[in-house]
Amino acid sequence: MKFSKPLILSEIAQLINATHIVGSTTIIATGINEIHKVEAGDITFVDVEKYYQKALHSSASIIIINQAVDAPEGKTLLVCDQPFEAYNLLVKKHRPFRALNSMISPSAHIHPSAIIEPNVIIGANVHIGKRSYIQANVTIREYTNIGDQVIIQSGSVIGADAFYFHKKEKNYEKWRSGGRVIIEDHVDIGPSCTICKGVSGDTIIGAGTKLDAQVHIGHGVEIGQNCLLAAQVGIGGKTIIGNEVTLYGQVGIAPRLKIADKVIVLAKSGVSKNLRAATTYFGYPAREVSLQYKALAALRMLPDLLKKQALFLIFLSFSIAFSACGPPENKLLRADKKAIDTLTTNALRSLEPILDSLCNHNKDSIKQVAIDSILLARKKQEERLRGRE
């Protein structure tokens, strides 16, 4: 978020009741931003010690902090008890809340060639470019910048507050959303989409990008040019998406990720890590599609593989048990041995229905019952053969 005019350091220190000033006293502030998007001239804040170094070595020129430490060269630290409250106070002062009291704010700038249908609500300091078409029942909140030849279909909300809260000991405190939404030229936005403004930075939809129905874009997201987002895609805050990216229906993307150019993510996938360029992904968590399909194929084969493995283990156990019995007292003829082998084979085949349930039962107990049954059958057969002699 940029200030309407630069702020001198003493003015900032007085407003937030800073107890100490560490570093340069001649720095001028031109904006305020979260640590993720700071630029030279920006104010940011830090109130957790483990993040001190990240804040101190960021591009921010002024850091509001809750403890006096050494300031890097060219930076200024403003020490106060509650850095978050100080930061939020600055945003509220320079981007104050203004409740809508008319359908179209007098401060909105709408190009004469733009088409605005009935029941469109347009907030303060909104800019709408040439030949853009805003359908009925669209809400465009403050400080939204819409380019030329943009189409926004009915029911969409552009510039909703960021879903962003500062965790307290017993509750959550809402941040003042001081950022903007920037929609570049030739963007199409489907019905009932929601695009949140940044907390203090910008949410950007690149030129030529197309959004289907019910797409949600979180705060501070940056989407490149000529992307396609199918219905019910959801993108977490501060994620950066490259050019010519295709996201199929119901894809969910976690916050603060980077999706490179020309990535394709297939339907219902969940993205939890950065994705590399020109690659197709699928599944949850999303992986390269060839790997994911192989994994799914292996999963489908798993019950048969377990069944075969169990059959092998049972046969191996039977062989060991059979050999442990030792040879019978009376020598068996070859025909008798063949009869026993046939009996063993038939017994193993009879176990196949049992093996089908191995995935859901105790393998060891089923195996033991099977071995006991086979050994008992073998004993009875030997006794019967000896009885002939």
Image: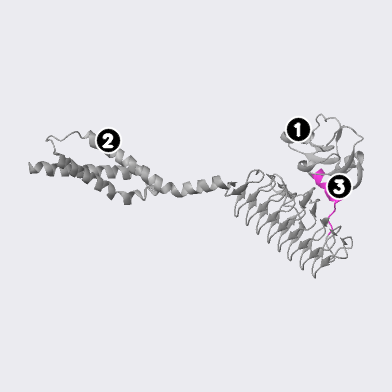
- Residue 112 x %, y %: 88, 65
Query: Is residue 243 part of the magenta span, yes or no?
Result: no
Residue at horizontal 21%, vertical 35%? Answer: 325
Residue at horizontal 79%, vertical 60%? Answer: 150
Residue at horizontal 24%, vertical 48%? Answer: 346
| Foreground disc of the pair 3, 1 | 3
- Residue 255 x %, y %: 68, 47
Label 3 crowd bin: few (<14), some (14–19), many (20+), radius 10 Å: some
Residue type at mark 1: give it: Gln
Badge 1 or badge 2: first in the primary sequence: 1
The label on residue 2 is 3
Q: Quadrant of the C terminus?
A: top left
Query: Is residue 92 part of the magenta span, yes or no?
Result: yes
Label 1 crowd bin: few (<14), some (14–19), many (20+), radius 10 Å: few
Magenta span covers which residues?
A: 85-98
Q: Residue under circle 1?
A: 53
Q: Secondary structure at mark 3?
A: strand
Badge 3 or badge 1: first in the primary sequence: 3
Side of 142 where 339 appears, left or right: left
Nearest the viewer among 272 and 281 is: 281
Q: Is residue 362 visible?
A: no
Q: Residue under circle 2?
A: 320
Residue type at mark 2: give it: Ile
